[in-house]
Each structure stands twice: as C-alpha cells, then as structure tokens.
Amino acid sequence: MSIPQEAVHSVLNHVLPHIERHLQCQSPTSTIRRPFILGLTGLQGSGKSTWTDALVKELRQSHGFNTIHLSLDDLYLDHDDLVQLRADNPSNKLVQTRGQPGTHDIALARSFFESLRAGSEILIPSFDKSKFNGEGGRKPKDTWYRVPAGTAIDVVVFEGWCVGFQPLEETAIRQRWEEGLQKQTALEYPTETLKDHAVEHLLDANTQLRGYCDLFMGPKHLDFLVHLDTDDLVNVYRWRMQQEHALRARTKESMTDEQVVQFVKGYMPAYELYLGQLRRAFFGLSVSNARNKGQLRVVLDQDRTVVDIDLYK
Ligand SMILES: Nc1ncnc2c1ncn2[C@@H]1O[C@H](COP(=O)(O)OP(=O)(O)OP(=O)(O)O)[C@@H](O)[C@H]1O
C-alpha cells in the first residue's frame, strides 16, 4: 500500500519551507550541521511506517535532501531487558509487553541523537519484532545501517506512536484517573481504559515520558511535527483488524479480533491522557524559536484516506 502522491505533496508543501530555512541557518563551511528533525507521530496502524517511506523517498529523490529515518520502535530495550522489566513489575500491565514509555533504551536514544549533533559515525539501531515468538529483540549491531562520520545529513524523519506526547502534571493524571473510575467501558472497542490500571503505573509511564521528552523527543528537539490522527478513536481498532485480516488471508498467522482488541487497548491509556494536548499544540510558546517550528494534523478516515490537513500557526 502506498500513500497517494498528492497527499505526500500536500504535507511536504508545508514542511519544505521550514527545512530550507533551517538548512540556510547552518554553516555551509562546517561538516557538522544539525539536521532538521521531522517528527512523525500517529495512532497504532495509522500508517506511520508507510508515510515515513513515502516522505523519505520524496525528500531524497525530488528535493535532493540527504535524509535518514529512525523509528522509536527501533529503540526498544533488548529482549533480556524487556523480560527483566516485566519480571520486576508483575502487577504493571503497561510493561508486560514492549510499547509504553519505559520500554525503550534511553542510552541508545542518547547515543543516536548525540551522534547526529557531533557529526560522528551514525549507527541506526534496528529492532526485529518477530524475534522471540513476537516478543522482539534487537538485530545484531553489525547489521545496523551506518552513516560515515562527517556526512552532512539534511533531514531525519523520526517516527513513533508516542512522539509528540508530553508529560502531564501528577495532579492532572490523578484527576483523569479518578474521572475514569466513573466512566463506562464500551465492551467492543474500549476507549475509556484508565481505570484498568493502577494510577501509580500511569504515573510511572508519565515519568518515563518526561525523560524521553527532556532527552530527545520534546518540542525543543523537533523542528516540525506531522500527526496522523482520526476523529474517531475506534478507527484504531478497525485499522488493526483490517491489517490482521489481510495478513490472515496471506499467511494464516495473525491475531484474532479479540487479540487485536487486547493489543490496541494497551495503547489507549496514553491516547486518553496525551492526545488532547497534542491536538491543541505541540510547540508551546515556552520553546525558544517556536515560531520557526510547525505542526500538521493529518486527519484520516476509517480507510486511512486523508480527509483533512490542519496547519497549526
Ligand atoms: N493510506 C493508506 N491506505 C490504506 N492502507 C494503508 C495506508 N497507509 C498504510 N496502510 C496499511 O496499513 C497498515 C499499517 O501501516 P503501517 O505499518 O505503515 O502503520 P504504522 O502506523 O507504522 O503501524 P504500527 O503502529 O503497527 O507500527 C499496513 O498494512 C499498510 O500497508
């Protein structure tokens, strides 16, 4: 499945002036330039990888930008550490599988983003979700993509499901959780799930998210953010089911609808807590040079067709 070219162009038309301005401000004589960091966030199964491929191809081929990409998924803890994390926290449902803030390797993230700034050799980590019966594990380091030291990278597309989420104050999390206790959970496609978790576990994930934002994922680190969103959160369940049904038709190995609901439900608490702020604005006025940064909300329908593109000003 590919993204229609006109949708890719519509998005890039908003991003390109920012990239050009950014690159003009970098010293032409220096081989060490800070690349433009284009964040791409989106709901589970919204098409982040597919959009990343399309954007990278267009940036390279039509605009000549030396572009690399990293997925937050490639920063997961290695398998042994994921196993240890869940063994150390048996009652915390949020860390029983990879996914939530806290299940990524902060040291690995730091070394990747530092290598971008330093102009040293860049090693792009790679995680194989199929290893260990689907629990996932890191690919051997000697298979990672390497960018030689001194290479001038123009653009990095950094994609991940919780890129763009920003931590909340503890009181806000407690309040949302308490409100959640009063809410009914829809049986088929639940979108009110906070009460399924201990508030301490939600707070732990929030603390982890704060660390991510401080280090590599917050507004000061990104230059532009594209957000793949939908007006109906139930579409996240539908998208994943479509994907699994297509997989079943091809390979006979896929999740059942019930497994899809359990899988997607694991991401719901973060959507419930953090999507509101992301939809209001990612780059707040507290960020220096916020006016040079930009945010787009790309609204998808249940077939992932783009129905709207909103530019935040
Ligand atoms: N615009 C689109 N129209 C229809 N199908 C699409 C579109 N974009 C992606 N898909 C299909 O949706 C599925 C999920 O896409 P993709 O893997 O890119 O999403 P993702 O957001 O990266 O997923 P995940 O959250 O699981 O990492 C794939 O089967 C892909 O082919």
Image: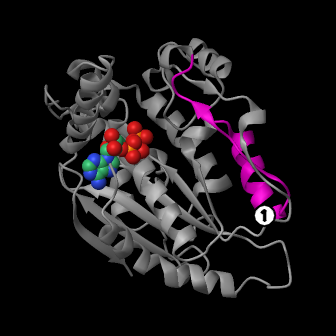
Q: Residue at x 56, y 15 (%)?
A: 132
- Answer whether residue 164 is visible to the viewer in this image: no
Percent from the top left, x then y, of residue 284? 48, 72
Instruction: Determine if residue 225 is in view.
Output: yes
Residue 290 figure quarter: bottom right
Query: With respect to residue 221, does 141 lie above or below?
Result: above
Left or right for 262, reference 106: left
Q: Residue at x 73, y 41 (%)?
A: 108
The C terminus - image quarter = bottom left
Q: Is mark 1 within 8 Å of ligand 1?
A: no
Q: Position of residue 110 (x, y in %)?
A: 74, 48
| Disc 1 element | helix
Q: Is residue 247 left or right of residue 149?
A: left
- Up the image or down, 276 lies above or below 23; here it is above
* Residue 188 rendering spot, x and y as whole percentages: 13, 27
Direction from residue 124 to residue 298 in the image, left or right: left
Q: Foreground residue, 42 or 182?
A: 42
Work out whether 9 lies above or below 37.
Answer: below
Picture quadrant where residue 240 is located: top left
- Image coordinates for residue 226, horizontal then vertical, percent: 42, 64
Which amino acid type corresponds to the residue marked 1 in the rendered image? Answer: Arg
Question: In the image, which residues are magenta?
Answer: 104-131
Q: Dot 1 surroundings within 10 Å: few (below 14), some, or many (20 or more)?
A: some
| Magenta stretch contains residue 259 | no
Residue bearing mark 1: 117
Q: Residue at x 31, y 71 (%)?
A: 6
Horizontal side of residue 98 vs 280, given as left or right: right
Q: Quadrant of ligand 1?
A: top left
Badge count: 1
Judging depth in this view, the residue of 56 and 81 nearest the camera is 56
